[in-house]
Image (spheres, helix red, strand yellow):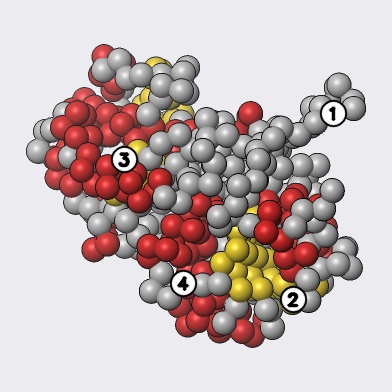
């Protein structure tokens, strides 16, 4: 049965969420969740009929059978795909953090690929205008944390699409760490950067389509002409492995859904002189520095944080901090992800690292303030506050964000 344009749209819709039917081959489980792209394609791309289309995407823009949506759309005469826009790390995902792939033609399809990284406002609007598109489509897998830059690529592209007079369509994908709750400090706009443009929680607990609706309603000075295509089969309690969808690393240091599970907390170590595990096979699960010993794991385990244990660990990163040098630290082992709070855990690890290792220091550029969204975490930790004091400091801001967030949730 074909879906009408109205049933595909999220705004005001009451589309039932149902599980996909069982696969004919019992040895090959079928995805329970149908992404926004799967539903768009099943409807024959009626939302894009008569439009010249450009897609903001990366390697995560795939179908349930692991085909890339650019290849699928380019081969389908029902859609006029004319351009691709690559974010940080690039359309094909080859660049490390803080890099992109630049302007080039995709060798597989011949389509022009435009670089959006570090472009915003009128400069990005000019890219959309030069590409000749009528509609900009966004389809990228998020990791669920405010400082993961793809959601700010979404934001910047929405602003630029409005400036350029383009329609904007968001194809929804799961939040890989569930959408149960928002956690952590809320950004102070005085600290707005590309790792946080607007006041949302550190772990936002939303999908990209929900964020797009929030951005359009609460933060954009002039709302863009926005349409969203929601998923079916996704529940707010779902972690990524419940979806049946294939996991593609959304960036080089996000290799598994388990990485995403801890990332909203342990990415804070980017703002310190400790390694956050880049250059290992367990980025953001391994943390450490030269001179750190078993006292850190002992102090962290003594807090009895819900859902997680800490193992004394030693590792030698192949790049980034401490490249080629053996460091000591901890590895996180999440044994109950329902109980695990990544942000509280990240704060507890900062507090115990500072108390158990005399060499602890913040990055000189105060990157920690940009990650947490204010000076509050840094100053409280420096003042000797314990985990409960730091976490309690953002309670009011978080409650206010949760109330705003609730208005834009598509999956109940």
Location of residue 378 with respect to 357 vertically, above or below: below
Label drawn at residue 23? 1
For disc 2, the marked residue is: 51
SS label for mark 2: loop
For marks 1 and 3 on the same chain, the one whose residue lies earlier in the sequence: 1
Q: If you read the primary sequence from the N terminus, does the residue marked by circle 2 or circle 4 appear first?
A: 2
Q: Which mark is residue 184?
A: 3
The residue singled out by tag 4 in the image is: 223
Q: Earlier along the polypeptide chain: callout 2 or callout 3? A: 2
Between 277 and 32, the residue placed more toward the observer is 32
Vertically, is 252 above or below 295? below
Nearer the observer, 12 or 120: 12
Whether residue 115 is visible here, answered yes or no, is: no
In the image, what residue occupies the spot 83% across and 59% down?
Answer: 44
Q: CA distance from mark 2 to mark 1?
A: 35 Å
Q: Position of residue 409 (x, y in %)?
A: 48, 46
Q: Which residue lies at the image location 55% right of the left edge and 75% below the top edge?
A: 161
- The residues tagged by marks 1 and 3 sit, at their Cα atoms, a distance apart of 39 Å
């Amino acid at each position: 049965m074909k879906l009408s344009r109205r049933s595909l749209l999220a705004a005001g819709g009451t589309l039932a969420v149902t599980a996909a039917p069982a696969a004919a081959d019992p040895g090959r489980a079928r995805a329970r969740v149908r992404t926004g792209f799967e539903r768009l394609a099943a409807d024959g791309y009626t939302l894009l009929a008569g439009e010249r289309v450009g897609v903001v995407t990366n390697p995560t823009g795939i179908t349930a059978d692991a085909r890339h949506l650019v290849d699928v759309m380019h081969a389908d005469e029902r859609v006029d795909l004319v351009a691709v826009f690559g974010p940080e790390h690039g359309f094909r995902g080859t660049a490390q953090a803080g890099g992109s792939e630049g302007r080039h033609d995709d060798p597989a399809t011949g389509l022009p690929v435009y670089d959006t990284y570090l472009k915003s406002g009128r400069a990005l609007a000019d890219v959309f205008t030069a590409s000749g598109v009528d509609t900009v489509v966004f389809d990228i897998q998020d990791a669920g944390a405010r400082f993961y830059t793809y959601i700010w690529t979404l934001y910047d592209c929405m602003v630029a699409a409005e400036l350029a007079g383009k329609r904007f369509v968001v194809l929804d994908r799961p939040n890989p760490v569930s959408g149960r709750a928002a956690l952590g400090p809320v950004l102070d706009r005085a600290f707005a950067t590309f790792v946080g443009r607007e006041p949302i929680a550190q772990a936002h607990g939303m999908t990209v389509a929900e964020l797009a609706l929030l951005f359009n309603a609460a933060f954009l000075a002039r709302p863009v002409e926005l349409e969203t295509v929601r998923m079916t089969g996704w529940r707010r309690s779902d972690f990524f492995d419940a979806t049946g969808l294939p996991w593609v690393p959304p960036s080089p240091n996000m290799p598994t859904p388990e990485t995403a599970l801890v990332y909203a907390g342990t990415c804070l170590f980017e703002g310190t002189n400790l390694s956050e595990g880049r250059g290992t096979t367990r980025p953001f699960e391994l943390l450490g520095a030269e001179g750190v010993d078993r006292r850190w794991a002992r102090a962290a385990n003594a807090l009895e944080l819900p859902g997680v244990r800490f193992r004394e660990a030693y590792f030698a990163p192949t790049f980034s901090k401490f490249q080629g040098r053996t460091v000591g630290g901890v590895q996180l082992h999440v044994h109950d992800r329902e109980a695990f709070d990544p942000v509280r855990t990240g704060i507890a690890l900062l507090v115990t690292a500072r108390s158990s290792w005399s060499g602890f220091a913040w990055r000189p550029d105060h990157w920690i303030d940009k990650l947490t969204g204010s000076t509050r975490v840094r100053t409280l930790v420096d003042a000797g506050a314990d985990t409960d004091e730091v976490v309690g400091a953002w309670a009011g801001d978080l409650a206010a964000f949760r109330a705003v967030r609730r208005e834009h949730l598509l999956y109940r």
